[in-house]
Amino acid sequence: MEISEKVVVVTGGASGIGAAMVTRFAAEGAGAVVALDIDGDGAATIAAAVGGSSYELDVADDAQTRSVFNQIEDELGRIDILCLNAGIATAGSVDVPNEVWQRTWDVNVMSHVYATRCVLPGMLARGSGYLVHTASAAGLLTNIGAAPYSVTKHAVVALAEWLSLTYGDRGIVVSALCPQFVDTPMLDVFAGDGDAMKGWVHSLAVTPQEVAEAVVAGLAAETFLILPHPDVAVYFERKAVDYDRWLVGMRKLQASMKDKPSS
Ligand SMILES: NC(=O)c1ccc[n+]([C@@H]2O[C@H](COP(=O)([O-])OP(=O)(O)OC[C@H]3O[C@@H](n4cnc5c(N)ncnc54)[C@H](O)[C@@H]3O)[C@@H](O)[C@H]2O)c1
């Protein structure tokens, strides 16, 4: 899909990948760019810099989401491209407290359901729309040391896949954005405290601008998977071909992060 003249909404637009997408979409000639974020001031700053607009929104709040999307559609007439990008990184094992699991689920997964519900009827009526779900390589592979993050990102890929096969013949294009590590404030959670893990995570990190570049290319090509780290496709294929062997390799990788507490 061409970005030029399109109305684009980006959740989590105040920082990192979302902020880079807002900036890049404006540079690509979008008709309007709207940044949504729980950090309303941050979203306003990013949007104002490119002549866009913004709203403060907790994407995990269904009613608030409905209200904000109604306001956007009233103001701009339609939403052509929705980037569901807000997310939180929750590290830890199954003993992470229930309320933290729930919050991670609500922010990382239910937010995609709530916002998609708002835009889908209009997109289907027009026979055109694009949903970009920011998942993660953790949604195709897994994230060492971060069970809630890995599980919720798998769910995002599952939702995107379901939407694509259900609505793909009715003009709705769906992509799952699955970066490995990206140099944003979130990176500290993945890097943890140990030197080995930190070194590995930072060696793989790309910039948010490189991710935005991959998104623009992915939208042009309309590919389901958008992979700013092309190696992720190779690992994903290896996992599918021999799941047990892949798990052995992942355990070895985890063990090599010796100074990282195992979880
Ligand atoms: N940084 C990475 O290494 C990496 C890798 C793969 C995928 N991702 C994913 O990319 C997306 C963006 O992350 P990022 O790296 O830019 O991190 P970031 O922390 O820089 O940005 C996340 C943004 O989401 C916003 N946000 C968080 N909770 C929210 C809520 N409830 N409602 C509205 N906004 C909320 C934050 O305020 C922030 O502006 C996330 O979904 C993340 O899981 C990140």
Image: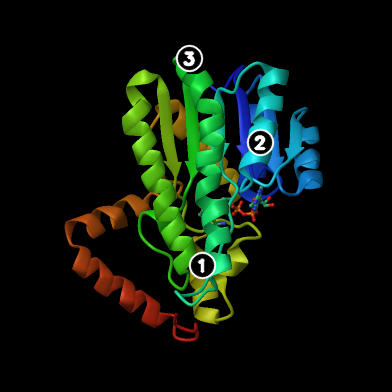
Q: Residues within 10 Å of mark 3 (few under 14, many from 20)?
A: few
Q: Any atom of ligand 1 within 8 Å of the CB at mark 1?
A: yes
- Image coordinates of residue 5 in percent, x first then y, are 62, 16
Q: Residues within 10 Å of mark 2 (few under 14, many from 20)?
A: many
Which structural element holds mark 2?
A: helix
Q: Earlier in the sequence, mark 3 or mark 2?
A: 2
Mark in the foreground, 3 or 2: 3
Q: Any atom of ligand 1 within 8 Å of the CB at mark 3?
A: no
Q: Look at mark 3 in the image and give the residue it sits on.
A: 125
Q: Any mark on residue 214, and which? A: none
- 6 up-or-down from 250: above or below: above
- Image coordinates of residue 93 in percent, x first then y, are 46, 75
Q: Look at mark 2 in the image and give the residue it sits on.
A: 22
Which structural element holds mark 1?
A: helix
Q: Is residue 48 visible?
A: yes
Amino acid at circle 2: Val
Q: Earlier in the sequence, mark 1 or mark 3?
A: 3
Q: Is residue 235 left or right of residue 117?
A: left
Mark in the foreground, 1 or 3: 3
- Image coordinates of residue 60 in percent, x first then y, are 61, 48
